[in-house]
Image (cartoon, rainbow, N blue to C red):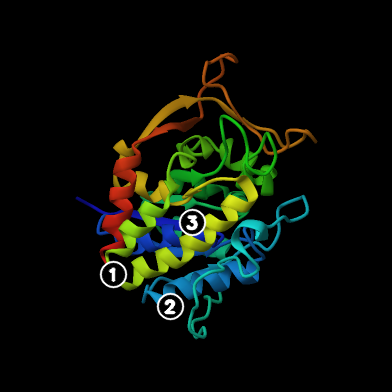
Amino acid sequence: MSKTRIILDCDPGHDDAVAIMMAARHPDIELLGITVVAGNQTLQKTVTNALKVCQHLDINVPVYAGSARPLVKDPIHAEFIHGKSGLDGPAFAPLTRRPEPMHAVSFIIKTLMQSEGDITLVPTGPLTNIALAMRMEPRIINKIRQIVLMGGSAGAGNITPAAEFNIFADADAAKIVFESGLPIVMCGLDVTRQVRCYQEVIDRMAQLGNKASTLFKEMMEFYNQTQLTAFHLVGGPLHDPVTIAYLIDNSVLELNYCNVNIDNRSEVSYGRTNCDLINFWKKEPNVHVATGVNVERFWDIVESCLALY
């Protein structure tokens, strides 16, 4: 069986870090590069965090710095969840790795244009890098196999009542991506809120006793505390790794193919992913929206990935 070739576009972030850990070692995935965007923290910090995770776990994948701000609006960050560094909790050794000199958007364009149309884009942060790549070189759209993203919600948001953080951070970019005509799988809050990292999950992963499981434990203990403070949640939702779990085993998610419209104009509902799950609009479907997740299978996949270190 051939590997799924991916570019992981992220904004680490505790859950992004777990997605990196999973994608970098699983035998069914070929991680071509990690492109980084501002989101959970500033670009400088999210790039640093990606490099720290790679250095700590000897992940030899190039890291590219991308967009420092959204296409139009002012940037927002999630320090209240991810801390001042964007990856508070673990203690990392001094950083010796550096990002690649090429801009993330240029890397995405170059890699796709040189491909056979077999690359999946996996954005787990704001969609600014992906949208910019599509605008700079529209020919890449025919070179993308599919987009499997973390973002959006058919129900309530987590940064406003209407919007999920990644879409709210740059809804203009999200509109470009969602209207690209590409196959899109949206792993939104509807499923990521179901994969809660309870203490028993942390203890289970810690029993692996390797460097990755120790890092997972240290990250999740901090993350769970901020989720409890911010949202009164016991067990933080492990959002971003759902994308990687789906690529490893498609059966982990239930999908509903429907029309999704991005609200990038409203003041009250800016960033809302309007998911027409009941086909009210009678419009052509454009997104596979994840509406159910096999929670037990998800944690089995996470554990199997951490065990590879």
C-alpha span from label 1 to label 3: 20 Å
Dot 1 amino acid type: Gly
**Rendered location of residue 199, percent (x, y):** 41, 54
> Could you tell me if the residues under marks 1 and 3 are in contact, i.e. CB atoms within 8 Å?
no
Dot 3 amino acid type: Asp
Give the residue number, with chain letter if any, for mark 3.
Answer: 15
**Rendered location of residue 55, percent (x, y):** 43, 78
Q: Earlier in the sequence, mark 1 or mark 3?
A: 3
Kindly report which numbered mark, 2 or 1, lies closer to the viewer in this rendering: 1
C-alpha span from label 2 to label 3: 17 Å
Bin the neighbour count of mark 2 within 10 Å (Cα to Cα): few under 14, some 14-19, many 20 and up. Answer: some
Please name whichever residue, 9 or 239, is drawn nearer the observer in this view of the structure.
239
Q: Residue placed at 73% from the left, 56% from the top?
A: 75
Q: Residue placed at 25% from the left, 59% from the top?
A: 27
Bin the neighbour count of mark 3 within 10 Å (Cα to Cα): few under 14, some 14-19, many 20 and up. Answer: many
Kindly report which numbered mark, 1 or 3, lies closer to the viewer in this rendering: 1
Query: Is residue 297 shown to the viewer in this render?
Result: yes
Q: Earlier in the sequence, mark 2 or mark 1?
A: 2
Q: Earlier in the sequence, mark 2 or mark 3?
A: 3
Relative to 122, is 75 on the left or the right?
Answer: right
**Rendered location of residue 206, percent (x, y):** 33, 64
Q: Which secondary structure, mark 2?
A: helix
Q: Is residue 182 above or below residue 221?
A: above
Give the residue number, with chain letter if any, for mark 2.
Answer: 55
